[in-house]
Image (cartoon, rainbow, N blue to C red):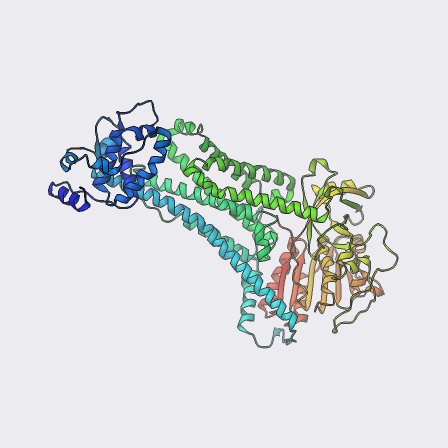
Amino acid sequence: MRTSSISIILYTLTGASHALYSGKYCPLACETGVNYVTFNDTDPSLSSKIRGCQSELRVTSLYLCFDEFCIQDSQTEKWIENQNPWCEAHANITLPSFRDILDQWTPDDKARVTRLSAEKALRFPTIDEVVIPSDELVRRAFTTMEAAFWEYEIHLVYGWYMYYFWLVVVAVGVTTRILSLLRSEQRHMSYKTVPEVESGRISGPRSPLVSLRTWLRRYVTTPAAFGDRCSRPYGWCTIPPRIQSLTIFLFVALNVVLCSCSYRLTEGNLYWPKKSVQFLRFVSDRTGIISLANFPLVWLFGMRNDLLIWVTGWGFGTYNAFHRWAARVATVQAVVHSVGYTLMILERGGWPSFLNYWTKHYFWNGELSTIAMCGLLAFSFYGIRRAHYEFFLVTHIALSIATLWTMYYHVEIFTNGEWNIFIWPCVGVWVFDRIMRLSRILAFNRSPLSTKARVTYDPSSNLVRMEVDSSKSLVAPRPGSYYYIHVLDDLFYAHQSHPFTLAYSSKDTDNPPSTPLSPLSARPEHSRTSSASTTESDALLSSKASDASSNMVFLVRPYDGFTSRLKSHCLLHPKRLRILVEGPYGHTVPLRSSQNILFVVGGTGIAVPLSHLAHVLASTSRVRSVKIVWAVREYAFLTSVLRDFRGLLSDERVEMEVHVTRDDEAKDDVLGEDLKSVRIMAHRPDVHETVQEAARDAGQQRLAIVACGPALMADQARKASVQMLDKGYRGVEYFEESFKW
């Protein structure tokens, strides 16, 4: 009867001492060594796997190798248990018991069995006898299998690190949002008067928490990544704000590090004798697996209805930046993976071998997937997204489907399709997003195909006004909301949807009443009301009148593509269009908790302060002053917008500077006695001076600076906000309202 100790003693005495191996790799090492041999006791026309089950010579050789080199019987028994189901199903053979075979062999019999050397095995011999792999062959097979499987497992572990990283990022976002909500609630419950500015700097004690928040806003959350360009692109590239850029940098660095470390290169490797080839194989596998692991993140970050947006409160633009960089990283990894395997194939068999691989289903699907990913990357640069959005959209959808489809068939054959664990979540995320989109469409109008919009174009202001019937919407619009609009009458482009920020709501824009509909809400004690009534748009934007709204108004500046086609519909006269409305989307900037608000906007960016104005001037708000600095090209644009908001603009807390930059009618002026707070200027605004003046006036009170307009204006406002924080104005908070693809 065999025991490990007896075997060791016997082979030591006979001068045939061998290394003994433990663990699951020992049976695999024996199997690897024996598989180099073709045993001629079976039908050669059968497949090698079926012959492996049927060959008594092969099975006996394996069992003797297990007995000689493997310490643990449990691992050999487990190997047999794993092999039996396949042999029974495909070869109608049940493998014999390990003990039944060993009991037929005495130590002397085993000592006389031919040893299969590594040199002979690598010539793939055909033999008709039982053999036992030599000690060298088993050692090389063991180290080969151990390194290969260790690398396989660490590849997968590192793939999961992608999710650990983003879990930490999301946890930080959720924690920050909860703390922000708690602070807002605390401010709402107890309002405290704060010190004023002293000699241009902030006076008063600083708590460590306030100092930390100010430092984070100054150096981490508010500034551009570097320099003062954030909204403005660098050529065809856009750089997100510093906090986003730091997160993306850490993600990219993590991927680079994990694709560059933990490679076990072994001497005498049976699969890849050269260490350079081992390294190339392991790097190719690592990058391919981590690229695949990044797929669900790419799809998750790119959806409109992203659960992460809801739990962290971060905007679509933040996750869209994460989406682009996760896709770029995955694409580079896929390219390295494909190039690595291409080099190995060419080194082994040249171009004929490479062309032969293109006949393999999994191979050409993998190559096509990499090509599709590269196409996605090439057609998604900022310049193409901005100038040719329709082309970008169509290619993005088509190539995304091609990437996912071909990747599914590329990994389907490996490890019984287990790699599809990274494919199906992408499909699930896509299906969830589409269901939520449909839900938003039905929530706006349960008969979505009957939604009508009245579209008018004013050539003097070059402005398209879209008025959408929202009387059937189940969700009231909030300040800063935006909606995706499909124009169903534009059949060829009806599948496309474009986002537009809601400017305001009105009751009946076709037949406005001659008198205001309702009085302005009562003001806080610290302010005085100079007007007893408002226009209908003001009243319907107030917090208590949202249910009465029936029309939503969008202000659209026509450029190319969709907006140009929208203009063409109503170029000669107003027109009613059938549209599909999906929304609302977006989150409301927490302005009502600030005592002072500064809007720095350009062109149709005026929709942002218009959508917030009634909300921040409501009775429950503690806003003391609102200043709007608006740069607009045409004087006619100014007059068409202001006529609906005279009531709110005559509130003593509101001040408005309009800078008409191109129209000859522009001149420094005030719009009449009832709008003394609105000043018109015939020059571009000095954004830095405007922000500095607002910070000086606010002192240590909270000052929310909201920018929406041209990229240069937004960057100037961001830079000025950072400079005010640096000067000690701790209450400054910067918000940028812009939709970034």
Q: Residue sitting at 46 percent across and 43 percent down?
A: 333
Q: Is residue 352 visible?
A: yes
Q: Which quarter of the image is occupied by the N terminus?
A: top left
The tally of labels here is 0
Q: Residue sitting at 77 percent across and 44 percent down?
A: 452
**Viewer-nearest residue: 433 or 67:** 67
Q: Looking at the picture, how far across and down is residue 539, in whole percent?
A: 79, 60
Q: Residue sitting at 55 percent across and 45 percent down?
A: 299
Q: Is residue 332 visible?
A: no
**Viewer-nearest residue: 264 or 664:** 264
Judge from the rendering whether residue 702 lies leftward or rightward of residue 111; answer left or right. right
Q: Quadrant of residue 56?
A: top left
**Viewer-nearest residue: 682 or 487:** 487
Whether 436 is drawn above or below 117: the answer is: below
Extreme-left residue of the structure: 13
Q: Looking at the picture, how far across and down is residue 465, in whole percent?
A: 77, 49
Judge from the rendering whether residue 243 lies leftward or rightward of residue 107; answer left or right. right
Q: Looking at the picture, how far across and down is residue 13, in whole percent?
A: 11, 43
Whether 485 is drawn above or below 655: the answer is: above
Q: Looking at the picture, how far across and down is residue 157, in whole percent?
A: 41, 49
Whether 723 is drawn above or below 132: the answer is: below
